[in-house]
Amino acid sequence: MFQKILIANRGEIAIRVICACKDLGIRTVAVYSEADRHSLHVRFADEAICIGPAKSARSYLDIPAVISAAEITNVDAIHPGYGFLSENADFAEVCETSEIRFIGPKPAVIRSMGLKQRAREAMEKCGVPILPGSVGILKSPEEALEIAEQIGYPVMLKASAGGGGRGMRIVREASELPALLNQAQQEAGVSFSSQDVYMEKLIETPRHIEFQVLADEHGNVEILGERECSIQRRHQKLLEESPSTAVSPELRKNMIDGLREAMRHIGYTNAGTVEFLMDEKGKLYFIEVNARIQVEHPVTEAITGIDLVKSQILIAAGYKLPDIIQLPVQFRGHAIECRINAENPETFAPSPGRITGLNLPGDIGIRVDTSAYTDYVIPPYYDSLVAKLIAYGADRNEAIARMRRALEMFVVEGIYTTIPLHQRILRDPDFIAGKTDTKFLTTHPT
């Protein structure tokens, strides 16, 4: 077992990893930027070391700075959390070279899954359904026009190394394609240092469904059910739940069986998520693999009773899945997560600043993951997430009732938050009926 782990992240996920390490009796090292000097992960870790100024490029994304902190503090392993360096294959390789265990997939797998077109090809070979689209990267506008004509408009252009909606363009007719392809390539180059773009058939009003993976280094793979992540804004998830109201027991079983074999075939290890779009007929199509822990992992923990972060650490330490989790995996109840962001709920403008008052909800069925406290200053340099509010119930109706109660009792003063938005969503008749898709916020003005 590891003796000491460095957490290459900040905020609530850094606190989450510290909690898992404390449960396992592992000492922790927090790294922090100058802007995070007074953050809770700095306070609660056993050691803390400043790695640079506020800008993430010179702190949390600075690989030499993170590795130097790890070597100075003599850690055994690094947990990258999500975001920042979590899916950076070069960082994972540097960890290996420095004889520090990277708590995540192997560098080659991260690199392969990070290129969406390559991931599509790998999944297709394993029999996982993918959307009709280009075979490989688009090489010219002429090729793009030919492929679009074959699969039919509308189509979606996507950056192969992309994420967060960048490098994506919807094309509805041939006359738009050359200009939009150039825009997508330019944006992809700026955002990801690669202009590689591919094409997929566009599903107009899909659901966004993802499956949680745990895989050890001995060939054991488990799929821990699905999460519904359809309520989004600009491709950024706002609310997640598990299980999905759109996934039948038969479809769930078929997907679990197929994904177990696919992830074993590509040599996946540790935690990860396989993301799909569901069309109006209820058919799922693969879109990408997130080779890391997800923001919304607590809903899976709630319905399975499995500590995913602790499992990540034990897998990296060489343990086998049957010794880590109870098998077969049992799914019980329903869980919902609301992301409470420091944003104006009407305009979505960021709202950094000092929290002058804070009350966190509690009682049965409620969990709050946060690093916020009264007088804490939400910095303008990073993601706007203030807290993750998770409600668990015996069924979906109870989970919704508990989430409503928790949102009413969640008080954050001094800044705007998205709490009012979530309250409106939780009251919407279509949400209550489980009728959601990725355009929910557009078609249901709140």
Image (cartoon, rainbow, N blue to C red):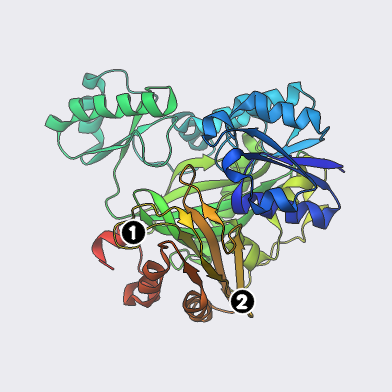
Residue at 59 percent across and 79 percent down: it is 394
Rendered view: 112 above or below 336: above
Tell me which amino acid carries mark 2. Answer: Gly
Relative to 259, 134 lies left or right: left
Tell me which amino acid carries mark 1. Answer: Lys
- The residue under label 1 is 281
How far apart, in angstroms, are the residues tagged by discs 2 and 1?
39 Å
Q: Secondary structure at mark 1?
A: loop
Q: Quadrant of residue 29?
A: top right
Residue at 68 percent across and 66 percent down: it is 330
Q: Quadrant of the N terminus?
A: top right
Q: Which mark is residue 389?
A: none
Q: Which mark is residue 362?
A: 2
- Count residues near mark 2 (Cα–Cα under 10 Å), then give few for <14, some for 14-19, many for 20+: some
The answer to whether any part of residue 120 appears in the image is: yes
Give the x, y percent position of residue 288.
Answer: 48, 40
Residue at 28 percent across and 68 percent down: it is 446
